[in-house]
Amino acid sequence: MFIAVAAFSFMDALLKLFSAHYPPMQVTAIRGAASLPFVILPLWYSGRLRELKPSRLGLHLVRGILGIIMLATFVLALREAPLASVYSIYMAAPLLIAALAAGWLGEKVDGGRWLAIVIGLVGVLVILRPRPDGLPLIAGLAAAASALCYALAAITARVLTRTERSSTMVFTFLMIVTLVAGALAAPGWMTIRPSDWWLIVAVGGLGAAGQHYITEAFRNAPAAVVAPIEYTALLWGIAIDWVAWAVLPGAVMLSGASLVIAAGLYVAWRERVVTHSPS
């Protein structure tokens, strides 16, 4: 999960660059298409292409549609706000995953963890609160929608790992994102600038690596434990914003993000305590 978060953080920085020149849905399609060769070629070389055949196509389709909405709203948020500010809203996703895992996967969530989830969502409201120097409303709402779709997609992935290989899940997700987002973006498709092709290759490599490792993470540990590692993205976001755009987060954003992160870490800690306590 640490590797996945680092890869996705640098990929997101490139997507932010793209968002200034291309529509969000086109950026989403580019992100999916750029990663497909990195998934297909190694399997083709090793004679394992048969692994790509899915057995639960309907659930794959649901996850893919959620991924399209997640990516498109995320790119829209990146267009309007710094990377760290968007991440500060996105940090609520692990809390949403813990809540959804209780209802969908039957994972136990006690009263303390429910309280932490509520506190974390209060932190999101602190970040979203309108103010002159705050997060633009459209960026905040887009980031919140993206976080919700990410949580739903993560729970769907958790279900799929019971029957599907990681390679199948990654390939199917990227293929659905590429085809559906590409079709939606086609009417307003903008010609890709020659100087952007090497960045697209980089997006593909980083996205494929991140998608593989995040799938493995959710395969090998409970969702409520794995997901909080996503919080390290905020550190990457602050560093990238500072180096690339000379932007640093404000005190209000950091205070709200601190509430969200503290709540998420508590949820993860309680999950570990409950998991390892004598039955």
Image (cartoon, rainbow, N blue to C red):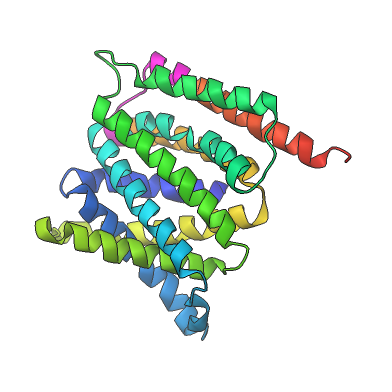
Which of these two is toward me, 169 or 205? 169
Which of these two is toward me, 212 or 182? 182
In which quadrant of the rendered view does residue 34 lie? Answer: bottom left
Q: Residue at x 48, y 76 (%)?
A: 52
Whether residue 21 appears in this view of the structure is: yes
Q: Give above or below for 221 relative to 129.
A: below
Horizontal side of residue 218 vs 37, given as left or right = right
Horizontal side of residue 32 vs 153, given as left or right = left
The image position of residue 25, as x and y in percent, is 23, 52
Q: Residue at x 21, y 63 (%)?
A: 183
In which quadrant of the rendered view does residue 269 lie? Answer: top right
Quadrant (top left, top right, bottom left, bottom right) of the C terminus: top right
Q: Is residue 246 magenta?
A: yes
Q: How many marks?
A: 0
Q: Is residue 78 magenta?
A: no
Whether residue 239 appears in this view of the structure is: no
Farthest residue in the right direction?
Answer: 278
Farthest residue in the bottom direction?
Answer: 47
- Which contiguous range is marked in magenta? 243-256
Q: Give above or below for 267 relative to 174.
A: above
Q: Main secondary structure of the magenta part?
A: helix
Q: Give above or below for 152 relative to 163.
A: above
The image position of residue 158, as x and y in percent, is 58, 55
The image position of residue 260, as x and y in percent, is 51, 25
Q: Residue at x 67, y 43 (%)?
A: 107
The image position of residue 100, as x and y in percent, is 55, 41
In which quadrant of the rendered view does residue 90 lie? Answer: top left
Which of these two is toward me, 96 or 211? 96
